[in-house]
Image: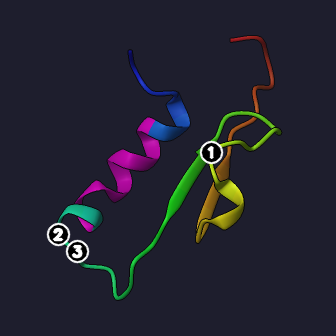
Amino acid sequence: TDASGTVKATMDAVFDDFTDMKLPAPVRISMACCLNMCGAVHCSDIAILGIHRKPP
């Protein structure tokens, strides 16, 4: 299945940085699609929260 819109947009933007190892230190990016924020978002360097404003 396809990833959610926030995951797809973020990975399209940062994929090259992660595959080429251009960043100065290891970075963890986590995505959450609701306010429950499951998926180890609390222990990531960058956390992105997507909130649905209208029913998908």
Q: Residue at horizontal 52%, vertical 27%?
A: 4
Residue at the extreme left of the image, as rendered? 20
Front in this rendered view, residue 56 or 45: 45
4 to 31, vertically: above or below: above
Q: What predominant SS class does the magenta segment belong to?
A: helix
Which residue has dot 1 on it? 39
Q: Residues within 10 Å of mark 3 (few under 14, many from 20)?
A: few
Dots 3 and 2: beta carbons under 8 Å? yes
Per the image, label 3 sits on a secondary structure element best described as loop
Q: Which residues are magenta?
A: 8-17
**Residue 13 among those drawn in magenta:** yes
Q: Residue at horizontal 54%, vertical 38%?
A: 6
Which residue has dot 2 on it? 20
Q: Position of residue 45 (x, y in %)?
A: 58, 71
Colouring scheme, one of rainbow, by chain, secondary structure, one colour: rainbow
Which residue has dot 3 on it? 21
